[in-house]
Amino acid sequence: MQPLTDEEVAQTLCDPIYAGIGAYPRRVSDEDWIAGVRRVIAARGLDFFLSTLLTALRASFGYSEPAWRRALLDQYADDEGEAWEWFAELLPGQEMPQVFVRMLCDPAYTGVGQRPRIMSDEQWMRNVRRVVAERQLEFFLPSLLDSLRRSLGVCSP
């Protein structure tokens, strides 16, 4: 067996199935998965993690829509993180509720598994960048695992 390359190690660390997402048994604790992801982000950047995460989730759980529809949605995706501006106009001066922030950061809503695609990959990545900038990785990474468990299920031990 060939040793894993640095790229393959980084991709493995980004895959949440090892934390017991979906029908996959837990191989690492949430804390260990988060620590591994933090190392990947420090070494390769947030965008590398986010795109690798989407690739891993789609490899494990598939897409909810055919490729032609995904391409159409991506073609007409807005250029900005419009959800924050919409919320600010709706309720000026108030902070966006955590439940709404968690939904905007749930990668399942990019069409992973059985969730409907309500945002493009780029829209999701913009949402996450904003959350990480405003609330830090300490908020985002545990929320990510929680969202994935709600969207894709948890493996029973």
Image (cartoon, rainbow, N blue to C red):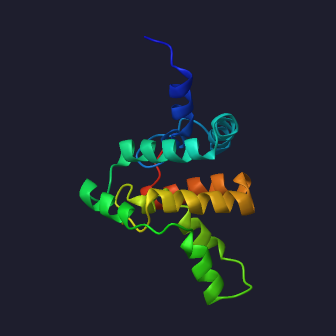
- Residue most extreme to the top: 1
Image quadrant where residue 119 sits: bottom left
Residue at the spot 38% in from the left edge and 61% down from the top edge: 74
Front residue of 94/21: it is 94
Location of residue 67 in the rendering, given as x and y in whole percent from the top left corner: 27, 54
Q: At 61% across and 78% down in the image, what residue appears?
A: 85
Which residue appears at 38% of the width and 67% of the height?
76
In the image: residue 20, left or right of residue 133: left
| Residue 60: % across, % down | 38, 43
Q: In this view of the protein, which residue sits in the foreground, 92 or 23?
A: 92
Which residue is found at the position 50% from the left and 56% from the top? 148
Specify whether 114 is left or right of 20: left
The spot of residue 78 in percent (x, y) is: 47, 69
Counting every numbered tag in the picture gives 0
Q: Is residue 40 above or below residue 86?
A: above
Query: Considering only vertical position in the picture, is 70 above or below 93?
Result: above
Q: Quadrant of residue 70?
A: bottom left
Instruction: Tell me: residue 156, above or below residue 85.
Output: above
Q: Is 149 in front, or is 53?
A: 53
Percent x, y for residue 87? 61, 81
Decide if residue 66 is in sight here. no
